[in-house]
Amino acid sequence: MRESLGADVGLGSERICEIFAVCFAPSHKTVLIGGGEEPFYQPATEFGGHHKVVFRADYAASALHEVAHWCIAGEARRQLPDYGYWYEPDGRNSETQRIFEGVEVRPQALECLFSLAAGRLFRVSIDNLGGDSLDPFPFQLAVWQQVQCYLRRGLPERGEQFRWALARASGAETDLTAVNIPLEYIS
């Protein structure tokens, strides 16, 4: 079933950056850049400069994830480094991990839809290899439920613009009403 939804041979990180640039460099003065040691959002530091969404190495999944955060962040958040959010590094305890997962539901659901549009597989990221071990199913279910919400109600405006551009570039389905994502896909 996973293979029929995304083959993970879809759009690569360079093409994802190009699509992002076409969608948002002129209108939002924002570019997507790979090669980062860690993902980070940097608002423009000079008048007329571009904001930078930096993703890890050349990983397409990281690019799609960081774009999801950018698409959700409001105007005020996009004026702050890393949108003004906290990040608790790997090694979180159970309580901190659940808080982290609560913040990650919406971006990971959007990333899931971007992955499908780009012809890539999606995997939920728990992002806590050195921390407390928790059952991942509640988080996977929450992400799937948010995906279903996006399918019913629509995506944030920038998210839909980017998802549609990815789908057009990869040849994936552009109509969200035609998309059916089973819970098994969110793993």
Image: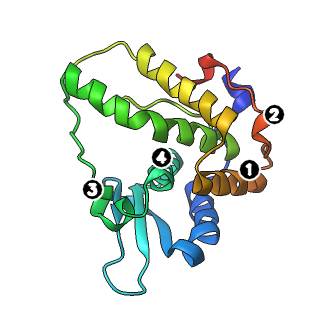
Q: Position of residue 155 (x, y in %)?
A: 62, 45
Which residue lies at the image location 52% right of the left edge and 72% below the top edge?
28
Real-space CA distance between mark 2 and mark 3, rounded to the nearest whole angstrom:
36 Å
Q: Amino acid at mark 2?
A: Ala
- The one nearer the camera, 115 or 100, is 100
Disc nearer the start of the sequence (4/3): 4
Disc nearer the start of the sequence (3/1): 3
Disc nearer the start of the sequence (2/4): 4
Q: Which residue is mark 4?
A: 65
Q: Which residue is mark 2?
A: 178
Is residue 175 at least partly visible in the picture?
yes
Mark 2: secondary structure: helix
Is residue 6 at least partly visible in the picture?
no
Q: Amino acid at mark 3?
A: Gly
Real-space CA distance between mark 3 and mark 1, rounded to the nearest whole angstrom:
30 Å
In the visual, does 61 lie left or right of 43? right
Disc nearer the start of the sequence (2/1): 1
Say which quarter of the image contains residue 144: top right
Query: Mark 3, residues whose alpha carbon is within 10 Å: few (<14), some, or many (≥20)?
Result: few
Q: Amino acid at mark 4?
A: His
Mark 1: secondary structure: helix
Real-space CA distance between mark 2 and mark 1, rounded to the nearest whole angstrom:
13 Å
